[in-house]
Image (cartoon, helix red, strand yellow):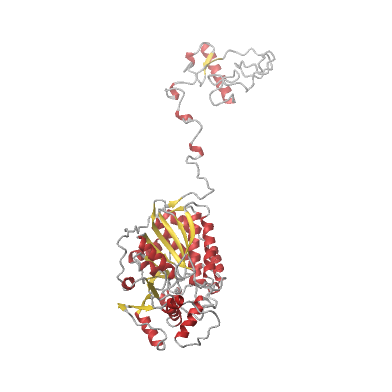
């Protein structure tokens, strides 16, 4: 309502409408703020020239106060900034298209970045753009779920209009709740709202604190607001622009946390406010980070990722060259080549087309992968009521390509490793079979130091000659009496077997296996060869030995 009153007063002052007021007049301070040309704005010189030629005299004064290469710098009031935003969408058919600045020097610096003279802030450390976390990336990528992306797009689309001063704040509150749920099980993860001075819509922030260097950040973001070109009150569901980017970012965060990812450097996810009206949200965040002298290794913007328009040319998307850091862009290309089969071209979106420009103009390396080559981009559906998920057949197939790229970007730039997710106990380091109860394997500790064949288990004999008359030397080195058996007829015991067996005169019961084996391999008084356990083979050996002994006695 405050904006509507200010707009009415503006047109009243310039004679465009009646000055009769049906309510209380706005305060003098509000009038001054609305019409005072206190905003320094930079925009593409060609866009400025096109608007000047198209507008009626006096409609909007875009007289430049400075020019640097392809960029013009103008002074505008708050009302004129809102008017410029509408004209950029209506006449130039462009998102954003201009930047707001705190000073003329800041505007000149942004112009130089756009003109290809990008220089990182002098305080920034050199980033490690090496690809060395394939195990982590390959563990995370299968976790990404298209159904979750579709679900988030559907919820955001249902708001109807997420304009920054209409339902944008409501959408921010909902997204905060989703991100807080992701952070619930981790002490090193947090979510919050970050307010802005130029809009009632806050930025939404999710942070995974770095385990090694929490003061250095890796950023990935998209914008949460929408805009209808015709009028801000009409539906602007923004399924592609940019619910798709927000949904992908949310799914990347969910997958990383589900796999227990712990980055070396802090990772920050952003849902930016008021991108459509001049990059308000990201502009304030980036300017504050620059004032604090933050270390930021890279910023990725995901703005419109679910509507392929370059498939006929065999392309999956493009890397935008505007406000892009060349080294970071090459790094993202390497990630795409390493982990995906996708093909990306290079294209240009124009001046200040999305939130990555806010970070780049503040000296931070930024990059933006886009859903198509910009030369194939059809703008007629965006910023209208037609930007719905139905245009993508209710799917997020194309968006999942950017989920893979974004997840790999986070892992390879923030480094780190996977930890055990909450509730999952790590496996025992020693496999069960590798840790027997006894420390010494049975076969590695023989009973004595002599080789087994040189020292028979019984130790009494080696041949029959070592035994007394009537005895034979068994295989276990024991002398066994082989004199004829005096057992009564009917005894089933083999000759020479003095085991009482069923002999009623034997009180021990003879065949019991309950007692311990005696030395020499004897159990229950029955001599057997090692490993034979009283088998017929043992009896045969005994009988042959007895026959041999009797022949010697003869």
60 or 7: nearer the viewer: 7
Residue 55 lies, with reference to residue 344, above or below; the image says below
**How many numbered discs?**
0
Residue 114, image quadrant: bottom left
List x then y, in percent, for residue 465: 47, 14
Residue 19 lies, with reference to residue 545, above or below; the image says below
In the figure, is residue 58 to the left or right of 423?
A: left
List x then y, in percent, for residue 142: 49, 58
List x then y, in percent, for residue 190: 48, 56
In the figure, is residue 346 to the left or right of 446?
A: left
311 or 307: nearer the viewer: 307
Q: Residue at x 36, y 84 (%)?
A: 49
Residue 97 lies, with reference to residue 475, above or below; the image says below
Residue 532, image quadrant: top right
Residue 508 lies, with reference to residue 195, above or below; the image says above
Q: Work out whether residue 316 can be spotted.
A: no
337 or 480: nearer the viewer: 337
10 or 507: nearer the viewer: 10
């Amino acid at each position: 309502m405050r904006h509507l009153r200010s707009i009415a007063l503006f047109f009243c002052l310039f004679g465009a409408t009646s000055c009769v007021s049906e309510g209380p007049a706005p305060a003098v301070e509000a009038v001054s703020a609305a019409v005072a040309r206190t905003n320094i704005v930079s925009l593409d010189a060609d866009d400025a020239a096109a608007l000047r030629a198209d507008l009626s005299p006096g409609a909007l004064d875009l007289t430049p106060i400075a020019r640097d290469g392809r960029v013009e710098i103008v002074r505008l009031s708050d009302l004129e900034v809102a008017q410029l935003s509408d004209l950029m969408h209506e006449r130039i058919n462009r998102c954003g298209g201009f930047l707001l600045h705190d000073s003329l020097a800041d505007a000149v610096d942004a112009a130089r970045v756009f003109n290809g003279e990008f220089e990182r802030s002098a305080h920034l450390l050199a980033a490690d753009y090496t690809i060395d976390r394939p195990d982590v990336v390959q563990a995370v990528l299968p976790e990404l779920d298209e159904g979750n992306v579709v679900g988030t797009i559907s919820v955001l689309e249902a708001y109807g209009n997420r304009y920054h001063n209409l339902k944008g704040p409501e959408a921010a509150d909902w997204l905060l709740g989703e991100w807080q749920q992701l952070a619930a099980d981790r002490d090193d993860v947090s979510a919050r709202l970050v307010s802005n001075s130029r809009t009632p819509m806050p930025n939404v922030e999710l942070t995974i604190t770095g385990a090694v260097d929490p003061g250095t950040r890796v950023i990935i973001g998209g914008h949460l607001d929408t805009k209808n070109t015709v009028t801000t009150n009409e539906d602007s569901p923004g399924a592609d622009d940019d619910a798709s980017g927000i949904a992908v970012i949310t799914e990347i965060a969910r997958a990383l946390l589900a796999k227990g990812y712990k980055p070396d450097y802090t990772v920050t996810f952003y849902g930016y406010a008021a991108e459509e009206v001049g990059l308000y949200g990201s502009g304030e965040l980036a300017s504050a980070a620059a004032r604090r002298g933050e270390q930021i290794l890279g910023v990725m913007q995901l703005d419109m990722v679910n509507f392929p328009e370059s498939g006929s040319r065999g392309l999956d998307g493009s890397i935008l060259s505007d406000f892009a850091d060349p080294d970071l862009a090459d790094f993202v290309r390497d990630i795409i080549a390493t982990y995906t089969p996708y093909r990306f071209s290079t294209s240009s979106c124009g001046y200040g087309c999305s939130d990555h420009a806010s970070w780049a103009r503040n000296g931070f390396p930024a990059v933006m992968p886009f859903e198509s080559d910009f030369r194939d981009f059809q703008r007629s559906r965006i910023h209208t009521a037609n930007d719905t998920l139905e245009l993508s057949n209710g799917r997020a197939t194309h968006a999942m390509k950017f989920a893979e790229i974004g997840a790999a970007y986070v892992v390879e730039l923030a480094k780190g490793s996977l930890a055990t997710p909450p509730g999952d106990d790590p496996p025992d380091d020693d496999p069960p079979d590798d840790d027997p109860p006894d420390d010494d394997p049975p076969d590695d500790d023989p009973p004595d130091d002599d080789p087994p064949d040189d020292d028979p288990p019984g130790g009494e004999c080696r041949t029959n000659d070592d035994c007394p008359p009537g005895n034979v030397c068994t295989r276990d080195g024991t002398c066994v009496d082989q004199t004829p058996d005096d057992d009564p007829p009917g005894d089933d015991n083999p000759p020479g077997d003095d085991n009482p067996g069923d002999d009623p005169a034997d009180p021990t019961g003879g065949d019991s296996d309950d007692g311990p084996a005696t030395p020499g391999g004897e159990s229950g008084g029955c001599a057997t060869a090692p490993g034979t356990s009283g088998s017929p083979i043992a009896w045969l050996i005994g009988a042959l030995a007895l026959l041999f002994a009797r022949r010697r006695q003869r």
